[in-house]
Image (spheres, rainbow, N blue to C red):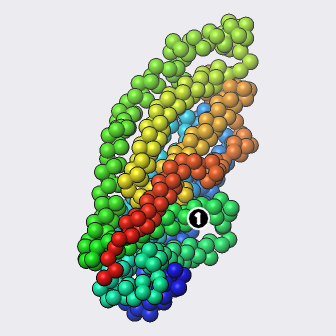
């Protein structure tokens, strides 16, 4: 079988048309990797400049009331991801800037897609675009007549007479086409690795290896299925038409149909409904800026009793800051409730969509490609969660300073010096390690392995009785 694979690859290399297409495609791949790398470097530089600028503004605050500083707030910029050069996933539509301030949890804004020209929104030249859509097409065109041509030319009969088994020939042709796809994949990853050799980490290497594995499985499914059709049907055109039909259904129709269905099965509230629900629940809690609010009065009574005094002026702290933090704590519980519900719905949507991999391995490939490149919605939600956790620490430090920093209740003119603002830590994003989220993609990997086994079974049992001529 290895000799047949060797001969098939030698035949491909000798084909001028094949070489021309391969050189043109590799040139486009190189261009996509170089452009993606350049874009990531520009984004990293822009992100660093913006982060430094905002931090400099914060640490340059001379004197200010801590709670006024909480309203002043700061901005968090979503860091660019080196891996998104290969598959940018949802990053271009999820936004990059999040304002962090007191009393309110803002939405992330300024997505890349919202600032792009209409034409470029429908497909940027990214490696994932080539690997997911174009390479499988190349494999189909390489494999659709691989066996039927051998039948028509009589070469298949000759090979059988020389001692080769039909199954060995079909498997060899499958592997030779598959190896071409794997070669393109390795070439792209090699170029990517060389360009980013200074930034490679263990996590990036692990993610890239899993990314490689996913595409290898998918390419085998495509190669094996096409060769199977070529072996089963005498007419090569029928094999090509069948595979093109499957490619269109798998890559265009089924993902959109399944995603639309999943969004209806597990429906998220509209933005307006979500904001109204948040506002309604927030109104039921303590208002930090309204000392006559009944919940504020209840908190005041509790604190006075705890300290054994009759009025807030006798308290050894600033009750305004304590009330502000109570307002924050209540707001945090409202955020946990509503964003927690949204995260739960998104999780159900993802799990339901993953099951689509049972009928469409392309869905499993997309899920693993984005997930292993840390550019799917799961990683975006993790970023939002880290920002919210930072916001809580950030605002609490300011409110605690207002409460315990030496000011008195009602003294809104009290200010703290620059040293305090410098002591407030900056946001430190910790990228999610693949080991922490790998279980979320195991279903996709398992489904692609099952598809691979199915294709092998089709070839083994479905080509036993093929006609040699």
Residue assigned mark 1: 208
Dot 1 lies on which element?
Answer: helix
Q: Quadrant of residue 152?
A: bottom left
Quick one: 400 or 4, which is closer to the camera? Answer: 4
Total marks placed: 1
Q: Residue at x 55, y 30 (%)?
A: 332
Q: Residue at x 55, y 64 (%)?
A: 213
Q: Quadrant of residue 252?
A: bottom left
Where 424 sits versus 169, above or below? above
Where 227 sits versus 441, above or below? below
The 10 Å Cα crowd at callout 1, few under 14, some 14 to 19, many 20 or more, is some
Q: Quadrant of the C terminus?
A: bottom left
Quick one: 159 or 199, which is closer to the camera? Answer: 159
Apparent side of residue 438 relative to residue 407 in the rendered image (left or right):
left
Residue 221 visible, this angle = no
Q: Residue at x 63, y 25 (%)?
A: 321
Q: Quadrant of residue 345?
A: top left
Where 364 sits versus 466, above or below? above
Residue 84 point in image, percent of width and height: 52, 62
Residue 168 visible, this angle = yes
Q: Residue at x 39, y 70 (%)?
A: 464
Quick one: 379 or 458, which is closer to the camera? Answer: 458
Residue 151 point in image, percent of width and height: 32, 83
Where 54 sits versus 289, above or below? below
Residue 280 point in image, percent of width and height: 41, 24
Residue 95 point in image, percent of width and height: 46, 52
Quick one: 307 or 182, which is closer to the camera? Answer: 182
């Amino acid at each position: 079988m290895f000799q047949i694979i060797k001969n098939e690859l030698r035949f491909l290399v000798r084909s001028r048309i094949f070489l021309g297409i391969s050189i043109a495609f590799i040139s486009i791949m190189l261009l996509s990797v170089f452009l993606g790398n350049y874009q990531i470097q520009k984004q990293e530089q822009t992100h660093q400049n913006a982060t430094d600028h905002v931090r400099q503004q914060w640490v340059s605050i001379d004197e200010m009331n801590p709670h006024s500083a909480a309203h002043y707030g700061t901005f968090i910029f979503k860091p660019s991801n080196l891996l998104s050069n290969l598959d940018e996933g949802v990053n271009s539509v999820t936004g990059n800037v999040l304002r962090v301030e007191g009393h309110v949890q803002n939405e992330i804004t300024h997505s890349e897609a919202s600032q792009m020209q209409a034409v470029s929104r429908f497909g940027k030249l990214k490696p994932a675009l080539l690997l997911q859509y174009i390479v499988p097409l190349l494999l189909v065109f390489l494999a659709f007549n691989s066996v039927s041509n051998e039948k028509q030319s009589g070469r298949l009969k000759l090979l059988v007479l020389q001692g080769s088994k039909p199954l060995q020939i079909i498997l060899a042709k499958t592997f030779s086409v598959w190896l071409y796809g794997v070669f393109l994949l390795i070439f792209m990853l090699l170029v990517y690795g060389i360009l980013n050799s200074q930034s490679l980490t263990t996590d990036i290497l692990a993610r890239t290896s899993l990314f490689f594995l996913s595409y290898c499985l998918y390419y085998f499914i495509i190669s094996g299925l096409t060769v199977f059709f070529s072996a089963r049907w005498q007419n090569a055109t029928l094999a090509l038409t069948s595979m093109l039909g499957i490619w269109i259904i798998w890559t265009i129709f089924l993902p959109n149909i399944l995603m639309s269905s999943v969004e209806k099965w597990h429906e998220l509230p509209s933005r307006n409904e979500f904001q109204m629900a948040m506002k309604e629940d927030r109104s039921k809690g303590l208002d930090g800026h309204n000392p006559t609010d009944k919940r504020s009065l209840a908190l005041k009574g509790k604190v006075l009793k705890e300290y054994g005094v009759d009025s807030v002026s006798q308290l050894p702290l600033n009750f305004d800051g304590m009330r502000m933090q109570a307002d924050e704590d209540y707001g945090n519980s409202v955020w946990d409730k509503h964003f927690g519900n949204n995260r739960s719905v998104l999780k159900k949507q993802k799990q339901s969509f993953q099951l689509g991999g049972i009928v469409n391995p392309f869905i499993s490939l997309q899920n693993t490609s984005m997930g292993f490149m840390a550019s799917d919605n799961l990683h975006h939600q993790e970023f939002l969660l880290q920002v919210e956790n930072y916001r809580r620490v950030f605002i609490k430090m300011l409110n605690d300073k207002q409460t315990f920093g030496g000011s008195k209740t009602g003294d809104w003119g009290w200010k703290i010096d620059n040293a305090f603002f410098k002591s407030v830590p900056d946001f430190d994003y910790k990228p999610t390690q693949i080991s922490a989220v790998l279980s979320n993609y195991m279903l996709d990997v398992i489904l692609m392995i099952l598809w691979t086994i199915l294709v092998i079974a089709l070839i083994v049992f479905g080509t036993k009785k093929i006609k040699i001529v």
